[in-house]
Image (cartoon, rainbow, N blue to C red):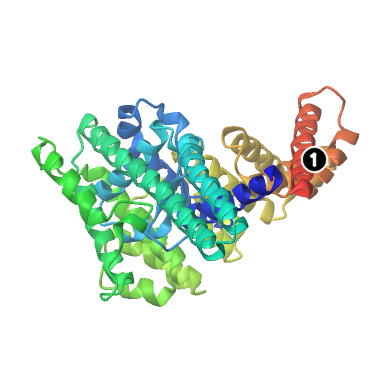
Amino acid sequence: MSIRILSLRRLFIGLLTAVLITTQPARAQAVLRDAETEAFFRDASAPLVAAAGLRPGNVDIILLNDKSINAFVAGGQAIYIHSGLIRSADNVGQVQGVIAHELGHIAGGHIVRASEGANAATGISVLSLLLGAAAMAAGAGDAGMGIMMAGQQAAMGKYLAFSRTQESSADMAGASYLEKAHLSGRGSIEFFRKLVQEQYRYSSSYEPIDPYAQTHPLSQDRIATLEGGYKDSLNWTKPDDPELQRRFLRIKAKLTGYIEEPKITQSLYPESDQSLPAHYARAYAWHKAAWPDKAAAETRALVKAAPDDPYFLELQGQILLESGKPADAIPPLREAVARSNNEPLIAGLLGHALIATEDDSNFAEAKKVLRIAVARDNDNPFAWYQLGIVYEHEGDRPRAALATAERYSLEGQAAPALHSAEQAMTGLEKGTPDWIRAQDIAMVSKNALEKRKRR
């Protein structure tokens, strides 16, 4: 009997896991890394992170390539934001409202406490299964099945109620962080109204939404709970930071140009619009559509308007590089690196351009900038890949293998990471920092493969 109960308990936990997965993005989604966007996230979130009692340097905000309007936390101090959320937001205040809510989940330890809701629901489920089984054994088959089904429904309802309580708690915490940071809650309310529109858009008018069958409180209820407190605050009429708003419009435009089809970008940012965000969006759109001359014209307009802007210089170099002109890309990328205080993502692009020239005289500089890039930002598989090319060019096979192991490890490819790490260890002096790092990657990769086999 105990084995059967355990099996049913696992089945119910599996059903709960399925519900959780539907409320969070899939792991397979691509992470979008962009130096300008990440700098914006850091600066926009810094006062909120401090208000939440967390250290700004320890909280990461990660952009995912997903057109749905969503954000979530999944352990640790990382907030995941979908590209669709940025695209749908109108101002920085709306984005800050979302970040404040997600910080409420982190500060409240909600991911760690998720097992509390699952355990309570599982207890109800197991009890109903036992009672149902007893009824069926006594000959009341229909009654036993009814008890089981009712128990499962009650268990799921218990978990959903727990989830809604956590969401409400995060709403209230987020509101307090906005107040402590002297930021208006207007953007938060505006974004909830957007969610209300989404709910009506995807629900049938003949089938009203059941508030008790949701993981989150209904958006109109959240507005009713929060709006009064926000309006009573002295910060309610405070405008968004104009500099952050300017930066938000830029990253929204470049994200549009990068993700959307060029025709959509052109309709949103027509050539009659000569603003910097419009030039930004069209530069990406023309580049994506394989019109290098038009893309170059847009980047020239950007650099002319702001010749010292590192992100405009970065884009100019990127388009030149990806258009088959790596030597021409080097000057703007060098300047972008210098003006961005050696921003690792931009440095990685410069390293790529230097290597792509296939000029032996450029490899020493490539090695220098790439080593700095991975030292400052280890979570960059592309930079590790480029550094591996440099080591291979030098004939340093062990360090080329180590760089490859780093790359595969970051990409979650345990088998090739293990192979490359073991290959590196055979050529590195035992006990050196590089040998120890290769050993660490090998051990982590081996453990990952063993866990995968057990599953």
Residue ranking furthest to the front: 138
Q: Position of residue 431 (x, y in %)?
A: 83, 22
Residue 308 shows in the view: no
Q: Tag 1: Cα neighbours inside 10 Å, few (<14), some, or many (≥20)? A: some
- Above or below: residue 373 compared with residue 429: below
- Above or below: residue 67 compared with residue 310: below
Residue 353 shows in the view: yes
Q: Position of residue 293 (x, y in %)?
A: 47, 72
Residue ranking furthest to the right: 426
SS label for mark 1:
helix
The residue closer to the viewer here, 128 or 400, is 128
Q: Position of residue 14 (x, y in %)?
A: 59, 52
Q: Position of residue 121 (x, y in %)?
A: 48, 45
164 on left or right of 408: left
The residue closer to the viewer here, 164 or 176, is 164
Q: Which residue is mark 1?
A: 446
Residue at x 27%, y 48% (from the top left corner): 92
81 on left or right of 119: left
Numbered label tally? 1
269 on left or right of 383: left
The residue closer to the viewer here, 258 or 202, is 202
Residue at x 62%, y 51% (from the top left corner): 8
Residue at x 36%, y 56% (from the top left corner): 214
Identity, as a three-letter code, of the amino acid under mark 1: Lys
The residue closer to the viewer here, 231 or 341, is 231
Quadrant in which residue 368 is drawn: top right
